Image: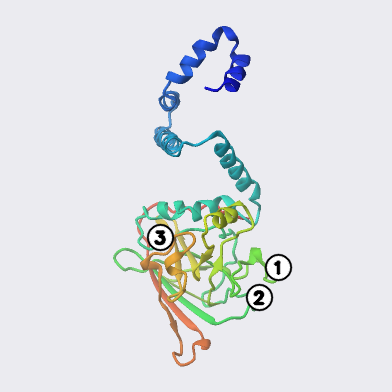
Amino acid sequence: MNDRFSENLQSIVGCRHFEASRTMILETDITKAVLATFGGDDGRLREVMTSLVRHLHDFARDVRLTPEEMHVGIEFLNAVVATNSATHNETVLLSDVLGLSSLVCSESQYDDEALLGPFWRMGAPLLANGATIDQTGTGGVPLYVEGEAVDPDGGPIEGVEVHVWQASPVGLYENQDPDQAEMNLRGRFMTDVQGRFAFHSIMPAGYPVPTHGPVGGLLRALGRHPMRPAHLHIMLYKPGRTTLITQMFVDDDEYLASDAVFGVKPALVGGYRPIDPDHPDAGFRLHRRFVLVPGEAILPTPPIE
């Protein structure tokens, strides 16, 4: 304990109690002391917080974290929260680029479960099957998507609400791009009696995750690229069925093996087929079957408005 710290501590606790206080600080197992304060009726909260504190304290001991480094980390987290807005969620982005979101998704009962990501919005227009989600006339290679929702035995599920959203050919979602119409390249569809839905769109493009905030600075400092491979987001929701959130990645994207948010699984890659193999500019078709298991249907909290 250095002299300056000793002087400051004495001014706080008083000279009379200084020696006893110093002994207490040196001999107390801080981790055990924190854990001993955990009570309350929520057993799951105690379980989560107990593990969090143990791992957090072990991390600080392992790297011999200095007070200066701790304050830099706190300032970074403050900056992450301060960067959030109605149209941007830096906190979700941080979870994604650290691989936490993908790790939690890997525990899902669905093999094709994927990240929600920071760009889903509530309130996309409800469209008739076969309609287009390209409301701006964005341009690009045409894409026709056909899907079907079935139960584990293969039976069709009618009345599934299917949310779809994607980036434009220039790699921007409409909330990032003033040249796109409100809710462009977003839509909702309902499955018919055969469990089917379909819509027209354009081929999605790969894009960088937002790098204007502190998470972008972290990626640069770590020498990491910010790119995501081209993909289409799909979420299927129906009461009585566990909500499925997934992404469909374009077969040959150069960033499939190095997705900035670690979201690519083999089950999510492929299926985009040229309508005319001799003329790929004529467009592509994507067909996918989605198995929905019985369970609780939950729509996630939208990361942006």
| Element class at badge 3 | loop
Label placed on residue 113: 3
Q: Position of residue 51 (x, y in %)?
A: 40, 36
How many C-alpha atoms fall within 10 Å of the one at disc 3: few (<14), some, or many (≥20)? Answer: many
Q: Residue at x 48, y 66 (%)?
A: 234
Under tag 1, what secondary structure? loop
Q: Are marks 3 and 2 in contact (CB under 8 Å)?
A: no
3D distance between C-alphas at marks 3 and 2 = 30 Å
> Is residue 228 visible from the viewing direction of this image?
yes
Residue drawn at the location 65% of the way across and 64% of the way down? 176
| Residue carrying label 2 | 136
Q: Is residue 159 visible?
A: no
Q: Nearer the viewer, residue 134 or 154?
A: 134
Q: Residue at x 55, y 9 (%)?
A: 17
How many marks on residues?
3
Image side of residue 258 versus residue 207, left or right: left
Residue 130 screen position, x and y as percent: 52, 78
Q: Residue at x 65, y 63 (%)?
A: 175
| 38 to 51, vertically: above or below | above
Which residue has dot 1 on it? Answer: 178
Comes first in the chain, label 3 or label 2: 3
Q: How is the image coloured?
A: rainbow
For label 2, count other residues whose C-alpha is less than 10 Å away and answer few (under 14), some (14-19) or many (20+): some
